[in-house]
Amino acid sequence: MVGPIPAMLRGLIDDAALFPPGSAPMQAAVPAHRGYRQSWYEAMVGPLLVPQSRLAELGRELSPGRGELRIGVIVDGDLEQVPGDVAALGPQVTVLHYESRHALDHLARHAPSWGKPVFAELPFGDDALDAVRATGFTAKFRTGGLAAEFFPAPETLAAAIAGCRLRGLQFKLTAGLHQAVRHRDPATGFDHHGFLNVLVAAADAADGARTDDLTATLASTDAADLAARALRVLDRPRALWTGYGSCSIDEPLHDLTELGLLHRGTSHEKDVA
C-alpha cells in the first residue's frame, strides 16, 4: 500500500521488536508486525527481523490463513544451516534479506546460495568498506547498543556515509535510532543519533556534500531545521541509506507525524483481522 507515505520514508524501518532494548516475546512480535502490515503507514515498515536461532520458534507462531509473513534473517549461527532453517518455515514466510556479523571471507563462501541480499555488519573505517565492496554485500553499521562504545561520533558516521558514496555502496544502520533528532538519553547519558539527521545527511551525501557538512548535520539538535530540510527531499527515494532496524515502530511514527513529515491516510486504512 503506497498511500500517503512519501518516497523517502518507504521501507525506512525494519521491525526489530525481538531485539534489545524492546526484546518483545515472539508471541507478541508476530501479531504486532501483522498489525503494521494492515496499517496506514504499512509502506514505511520493512520486514520483521528474526534471529536464525529463533526461526523454529517463529514457525510455531504461524497459523494457516494468516497470509505471508515477510522477514529479514539475522544470521547468528552456522552459515551452512541457513537454507535448511529457512526452508523449514514453509511457504508462509518470505525472506527479503539476510544480515550477519560473520567475517566477510566466511560469509562470501556461503551467502551466494541464499539467493537474497546480504547486509554485512562492519567496523567503521575505509579498509572495511574496501573489503565489502568486493563481495557485493551491503554495508551495515551499528549506531547504538548497551554501552557507550557502540554509539559512533558524528564525524565517524559521516566518514562512513561519505565513504559509501565514494565507493558506490549503500548502507544500513542498526540500533539507537528510535527518535528523529539527535539527543542525550537522560537515563544512560548516551548520545543517540537521530534517524532524521541520518536521512538528511544521506540525502546530502548523495548530492555530493562534504564530510564536514555531513558531520554538522548528524550533530544537529535543531528539529525544525532538520524537518524543513527533510521536507525538501521527501518525494525522492533514498539513494544511499537502505534504512534501519528499530525495536520500536511507534516512536519513529510519533516523531514523524509531530514534525509534519507524515500524515495519517484517510482512504487506505485496512481492517485488522
Image (cartoon, rainbow, N blue to C red):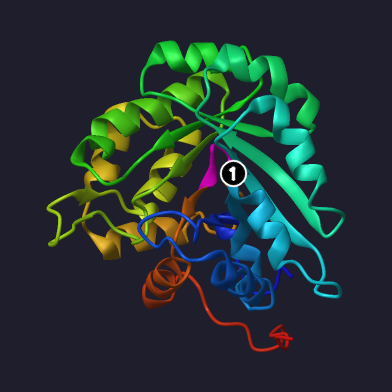
Residue at left 63%, top 77%?
35
Whether residue 199 is visible to the viewer of this picture, yes or no, is: yes
Per the image, label 1 sits on a secondary structure element best described as helix
Task: Please say if 162 is above or below 215.
Answer: above
Q: What residue does disc 1 label?
A: 53
Residue at left 55%, top 72%?
28
Quarter of the figure with residue 93: bottom right
Image-based side of 70 in relation to 213, left or right: right
In the depicted view, which residue is nearer to us: 273 or 10? Answer: 273
Task: Please say if 25 is above or below 171.
Answer: below
Residue at left 64%, top 78%?
39
How packed mark 1 is, by other alpha carbons closer than 10 Å (few <14, some 14-19, many 20 or more), is some
Question: Label 1 sits on what residue type?
Answer: Ser
State the image coordinates of residue 16 (x, y, percent, origin top left). 50, 56
Whether residue 116 is visible to the viewer of this picture, yes or no, is: no
State the image coordinates of residue 203 (x, y, percent, origin top left). 47, 43
State the image coordinates of residue 74 (x, y, percent, origin top left). 58, 41
Q: In which quarter of the image is the C terminus?
A: bottom right
State the image coordinates of residue 112 (x, y, percent, origin top left). 76, 23
Residue at left 33%, top 32%?
158
Magenta span includes 154: no
Image-based side of 19 in relation to 1, left or right: left
Magenta-highlighted residues: 239-243
The main secondary structure of the magenta stretch is strand
Quarter of the figure with residue 216: top left
In the depicted view, which residue is nearer to us: 207 or 38? Answer: 38
